[in-house]
Amino acid sequence: MSFLQRTHACGDLRAAHESQTVILNGWAHRVRDLGGLFFVDFRDRTGIVQLVFPLSRPGGEGGRGERAGDMANIRSEACLSVSGTVRMRNESTRNPKMATGDIEVEIESFSVLSPAKILPFPVSDEDQMLGVNEELRIKHRYLDIRRPKMYRTLALRAAVIRKIRAFLDERDFLEIETPIITRSTPEGARDYLVPYRIEPGKFYALPQSPQQYKQLLMVAGCERYYQIAKCFRDESQRADRQPEFTQLDLEMSFVHQEDVLSLSEDLLRQVCNEVIAEFGLPLDPIEPFARLSYDEAIHLYGCDKPDLRFGLQLFDITDEVRESEFSVFRTTAEKGGLIRGVRYPGGSGLSRKDIGELETLAKEFGAKGMATLSVEDSGEATAPESGYVSAGGLSVKGSIAKFFKPAELEAIVKKSRAEAGDLLLLIADEYMAGNNVLFRLRNEIGDRCGLRDKRKLNFCWILDFPLVEWDEATQTWSPSHHPFTAPKDEDLLYIDSDPGRIRADCYDVVCNGTEMASGSIRIHRSDVQAKIFTLLGIDPATQQERFGHILEAFQYGAPPHGGIAPGIDRLVMVLLDEENIREVMAFPKIGQGYDPLMDAPSTIDEAQWAELGLALRPAKP
Ligand code: ASP
């Protein structure tokens, strides 16, 4: 089809183009027929400009007839080529909200390159789009992406990747692709499998990450590798998870942990700061990353993904209340449990009903129960008989206050650093069980008190993770990260006696309470790797069968190495303050991995079953 190709982009037109004849290619974003005048907001990927079709005006050669004939096809989202002259708008009709709002293009001729039928949703109306069913949007993603908001997201995502490449290329990293159909690389999820036609019963696995290949590239002497890597994990879906997602996967040889930390912190800060500036995002520049050990993070915030935009560190009052008359606390302490809590600033003003709702929430988070104490100015204390007026002039109230001696209440106030107006939420349980509730309550309080400042991306490092965790279900040790993570040299002595005590040279990047990256220094010696496999319950024959290649590779002069893999989808999510990973992917899946656009997964035909040597097992009766 021949058509006039654009001379200009819609979003670039300004007053400086006045009187110029321009040709534009794009889509009719919004169409307004005002009797004698016909206006079209015309869009291409760069922006929107107003076209005016003055029907009474004679067109160019053949122009008038064309206009008259095809005008009916200028409907929302029809694809057009138009030619016209840039004119200044009247003062009164200028639109300061549009970059091109000072001008319009008076159309002399146009052709409809492709008409559009009525759309399943109005791509030009962001307010209405908020109410559109997500599955419908994803089924018609090619229309959804016509929305300027979606296009900007993809442009920002591309900018993130481009800047990552520029940063690493400048530092002599080599971008290397690794296979997609391969063998299992464990990262804690189920594999996606691909049947091997030649030998029925054999399967490739899609990589959960390129972990083993990147380590083999270090053995191969590449020293500095990266890849914008697709990873595939069959696990339950969440707002920040998809069956396939993208990581910046990188690995370096002859490095210590500090080298990987400083390179990746520089990279993340530079990329984010550049993108914030380029896209005018409403975010403060990224500060240097705070550092916390895993133990500190758990102790202070109850989890290894703390949101550090606000303080509210957890407190522990076990020693203060172990002799108290409140039996729940006393017996928990006697059994080795802890009584820990979190402050709710301003929470002393909550009604009984509000507090009841918080208790329900705590139970949803897994608490057996929750006790509260409210702290007020003693001057305002309404029922002095049920509270204690401390030396600092504070009064403590609450249904459990009567069980504590004045000195105990004073100690609780001190330990919790409570201030007048606070509500103390107290959980009595085993250390980790209590933490699991308290970190969620802390985030809830952060939300309710408006402490999660939208302008801040607060990155931190979590260091020194335990190498392994005890898995009650399987009664085995499982890796906290993956089985290739190096134990700290000084902790290796616990390998037989107390494996849970071994810390790893393993690190996470967390931003605003979300895990953004994981990495570690790796094992590079075959004997140590075999020992760790054994600790993980993998017997020598299975080690050979599943990991023989890496155990052998480590016997040919493997260099010390380490790396990290930041999640690119999650990075784009936090930059754009999107709560759902699907919003930052061109073609995401919904539900349990369904692609409504391609209708995948799909059935295969009889011939393919036969060719692959596969059959469905009969369903269990
Ligand atoms: N392969 C790891 C992951 O996907 C990252 C790494 O250790 O570099 O989490």
Image: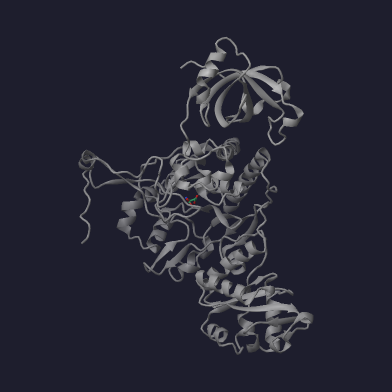
Q: In which quarter of the image is residue 464?
A: bottom right
Against 452, residue 284 (above or below) is above
Q: Where is residue 396 in the image (x, y as percent from the top left)?
A: 70, 82
- Identify the residue at image location x=47%, y=68%: 500
- Identify the residue at image location x=42%, y=52%: 591
**The furthest residue to the top:** 61
Against 581, residue 148 (above or below) is above
Left or right relative to 328: residue 391: right
Q: In which quarter of the image is residue 194?
A: top left
Q: Quadrant of residue 158?
A: top right
Q: Nearer the viewer, residue 21 or 409?
A: 21
In the picture, the quarter occupied by the C terminus is bottom left
Q: Where is residue 377 in the image (x, y as percent from the top left)?
A: 77, 78
Against 580, residue 307 (above or below) is below
Q: Where is residue 261 in the image (x, y as percent from the top left)?
A: 60, 51
Question: Does the rendering let one see residue 558?
Answer: no
Left or right relative to 451: residue 566: left
Left or right relative to 127: residue 582: left
Question: Does the rendering let one see residue 319?
Answer: yes
Q: Which colour scheme is used?
A: one colour
